[in-house]
Image (cartoon, rainbow, N blue to C red):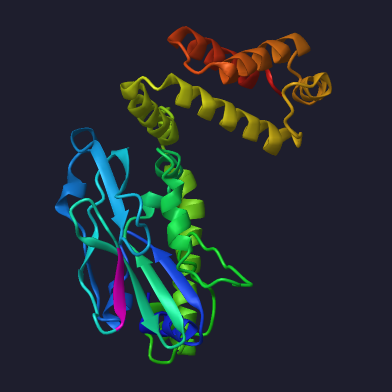
Amino acid sequence: MEEYDAKAILDYVYNGNTFFLSSSQIDTVFLNSIYCEVTRNPIMDIPMETNLHQAHVRLVPALEPVRDSFGYYYTGFSSYFSDINDRYARILGFNENGKPNCIVFFWGHGKLILHTEPRAFSNYFLLSDDNYHYWLTLLQTIEEGTSQVVWDTYYQTKNQKRNPGSFSTFSEIFRYPALAAAFWLAVASLLLYILFGGKRRQRILRERPPVANSSIAFTETIARLYLQKKDNKSIADKMITYFNEFVRSHYYLQVATGTEEFRIALSRKSGVPLEQVNLLYGSIRLTGMEEEVTDEQLLELNERIQQFYKNRK
């Protein structure tokens, strides 16, 4: 982020808007513009398997007078504001070490809300112990009657005219026609060398094993966290929720597990035999009715779901 971007955000807030930013590494250029500082605890560099514990965050009593904290079993919440502009900022929440991790910055006619722990808005956190109340409470800081909400999950760089005060290597090169021509000539020469020279010198490449699917490893890690608590019911409910969402997004069907029309439509669209679909949703219905799910029931449900994925088209 450059000073131009930071100024644009502050001007947006000054004109009466609310800007909510949650990031464990807020850009220093932006923090310097509001005279605040964020510290990241070195404990985050410790391997995950040795840093798992019952971590929690909490809000100031003025926002949440009933519930003391919101927690889950995972790595700790350790990023916090080590320096705050007391003239304009107020603290809204704290991490498990009592350090402020959420502040509201009053600027002009609007509000800038900064949060250092985006993991507190993850599915795993919000689905644990009704922690979604944490997010709902923070949403109350946004003015009622807001007519437009813009949601962005990353800092998006756009091709736009840059501020005259900004500097980059490429912008300086393209300012001068001779340098720009030399740059493109060098790029073209490099491409020709790679295209023709690489063909003559190319060696036989050995077959390499495929890259491991890190998403599977992450899912297995989350599953182990639930298994440590032996909460088979929660695991089964989430498996059913994810599977029904898969059906909705891939086959455009409104899930109605109790109707024969739905199961016939799912069998026709997915190519999975109707008998297998009936067995799967029979397991889903029985699992949903149980207050406690045994290991055998959980394994049977998982096996039927995996069979569906394997046989679908």
Residue in the picture at 47% in, 16% down: 292
Q: Position of residue 288 (x, y in %)?
A: 58, 20
Q: Is residue 307 visible to the viewer in this orientation of the structure?
A: no
Task: Based on the picture, tell me whether residue 195 belongs to the magenta stretch.
Answer: no
Q: Residue furthest front?
A: 66
Judge by depth and name the residue closer to the eye, 2 or 207: 2
Judge by depth and name the residue closer to the eye, 189 or 9: 9
Residue 100, located in which quarter of the rendered image? bottom left
- On screen, residue 304 versus residue 235, left or right, reads right
Residue in the picture at 49% in, 14% down: 298
Indicate whether 14 appears above or below 296. below
- In which quadrant will I find the C terminus? top right
Judge by depth and name the residue closer to the eye, 164 or 79: 79
Q: Position of residue 297 (x, y in %)?
A: 51, 10
- In which quadrant will I find the N terminus? bottom left
- On screen, residue 10 versus residue 44, left or right, reads right
- On screen, residue 41 versus residue 139, left or right, reads left
Q: Position of residue 91 (x, y in %)?
A: 29, 69
Q: Which residues are magenta?
A: 88-92
Indicate whether 28 appears above or below 23. below
Q: Position of residue 121 (x, y in %)?
A: 42, 51
Residue in the picture at 67% in, 17% down: 281
- On screen, residue 242 versus residue 44, left or right, reads right
